[in-house]
Image: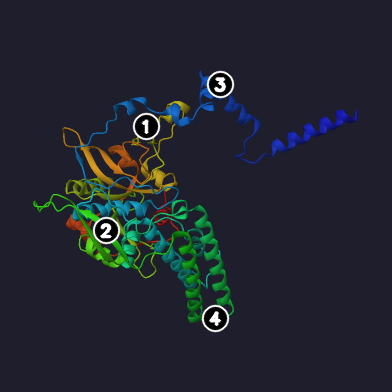
Amino acid sequence: MRLKKLVVCTLSLFIAVSAFAKDGAIDEKLLQKFEGQLEKIENKDQIVNMVTNNKIKDISLNHKKVISHNKLYSLKLKSTKISNQKSSGRCWAFAGGNLITPKVMTDLQLSDFQISESFIAFYDKLEKGNFFLERIIELRDRPLDDRSVQNEFSSLFGDGGWMHYFLNLIEKYGVVPKEIMPETKQSSATSTLNKLGKTLLRSFAAELLEMHHKGKNLKALRSRKDEMLAELYQFLVFNFGKPPQSFTYRYEFNDKDDTTKTEKEIVEKDYTPKSFFEEFYASSLPEYVAIVHNPTMDYDTRYLLEESRNIYEEDDFDVINLPIEELKKYARASIIDSQAVWFACDIGKENFKTDAILDVDIYDYNKTLGLDFKMTKKERLLYGDIAPTHAMVLTGIDTALTGETTKWLVENSWGTKAGKDGYWNMYDDWFDEYVLLVIVDKNRLSDDHKKLFDSKPKMIKDWQPFFLALRNLEQ
């Protein structure tokens, strides 16, 4: 009798709760509707078996796209051997090095040459540490939950960066060949290094804010900051090794203009990082500018990204926003004129790593799962589905008989295992959908586009999603 009453009471309670269910909740009636819709799919059991027992990418791979792909290019530029950033997020620095080193290879008649990305990363992290601590001092009167304050605490000391980071660093500190400051275990796998560095800097920030709350003046805060940077410098030396102040560079030079010489000449010369940069790079670097394609914002407009730099005293990152066809036009013209192009994209989208193919619908998830995953590029940007996650270099183009560009040759920094010796193949429709920024010589722009860089920019706050991603590029 008691059990019967308990069942009745429980049932009554369920009915009462169901009667007052919140609008928008999933209830039994809605679940039954889901089941009814699922039952209409004739091959649902086969799909479940297929998807649960295989990788979705493998069963969704578009076989027609793969077999129609070829690795021939109408125009390919000279480049270095494929580099490997390994387990680090220094793609921007490797892409920067890949962009500028062919000039040295040509000047010195070398078959290969690479700069030291460890040297670049060392000073990048030192500068990022200084930038972070200076920002904490600047924002010392704001509450900790202020958006800009939280952004500084969340985005400090990562591997990420951009082409202007690279240019600012080599102009300030110079360049050294890779063999002068080679990779270390920590530079090649930066996870622990970055975690410890962030904790160290956050502890420094806590101390500086405590000093401020106790009434210490700006001079005292900066004096203590300099002591903190000495500790950060020590931390970096222990992880990367000490950057050279001077070095001797030896290489074999074959003077093709002197027909009397039959053997290569061994050249030996002393340099500092700055003098090496001055001799081989300073006079030949174009005036690089950044063009983004962001259809969520106004075209033909200049934007300035608040606090988007790694070196505290440098200028913030400014870009112009243009339609995608303009980015492709300038990239194509650069390659035809023997100038490679640094670019940023969302590498996580529609890439077949085995053959290094970047192509729209290389995976047909719609047919595999019976769902529509399509979004416009504008929608993807608005709702956070894509972001600039990786930097590489365009080094070639392939054209159809009509003269239209069909695909782009891409020099990556992920080693030689994927694709043909590590080069990737980006089809033109993938460029439309997933390329978000290119770096080109300003002198290549039309007069109207050049003038945009002299116009008053619209300021973009440091916490806005698309441009926050521009600050944190690191794959």
The residues tagged by marks 4 and 2 sit, at their Cα atoms, a distance apart of 52 Å
Question: Mark 2 sits on what residue?
Answer: 250
179 on left or right of 57: left
Location of residue 74 by image quarter: top left
Badge 4 vs badge 1, beta-carbon distance below 8 Å: no
- Helix or strand or loop: what does disc 4 sit on? loop
Q: Residues within 10 Å of mark 3 (few under 14, many from 20)?
A: few
Q: How many marks?
A: 4
Question: Mark 3 sits on what residue?
Answer: 39
Q: Residues within 10 Å of mark 2 (few under 14, many from 20)?
A: few
Mark toward the start of the polypeptide (1 vs 2): 2
Badge 4 vs badge 2, beta-carbon distance below 8 Å: no
The residues tagged by marks 3 and 1 sit, at their Cα atoms, a distance apart of 29 Å
Residue mark closest to the camera, 3 vs 1: 1
| Residue 398, x across and y down, in percent | 22, 37
Mark toward the start of the polypeptide (2 vs 3): 3
Q: Is residue 104 visible?
A: yes
Badge 2 vs badge 3, beta-carbon distance below 8 Å: no
363 on left or right of 275: right
Front-lying residue, 124 or 181: 181
In the image, what residue type sits under mark 4?
Lys
The residues tagged by marks 4 and 1 sit, at their Cα atoms, a distance apart of 60 Å
Question: Mark 4 sits on what residue?
Answer: 216
Residue mark closest to the camera, 1 vs 2: 2
The quadrant the N terminus occupies is: top right
Any mark on residue 362, and which? 1
The residues tagged by marks 2 and 3 sit, at their Cα atoms, a distance apart of 73 Å
Mark toward the start of the polypeptide (4 vs 2): 4
Using the image, determine if residue 345 lies above or below residue 316.
Answer: above
Front-lying residue, 192 or 352: 192
Residue, x 37% and y 32% (percent of image)? Answer: 362
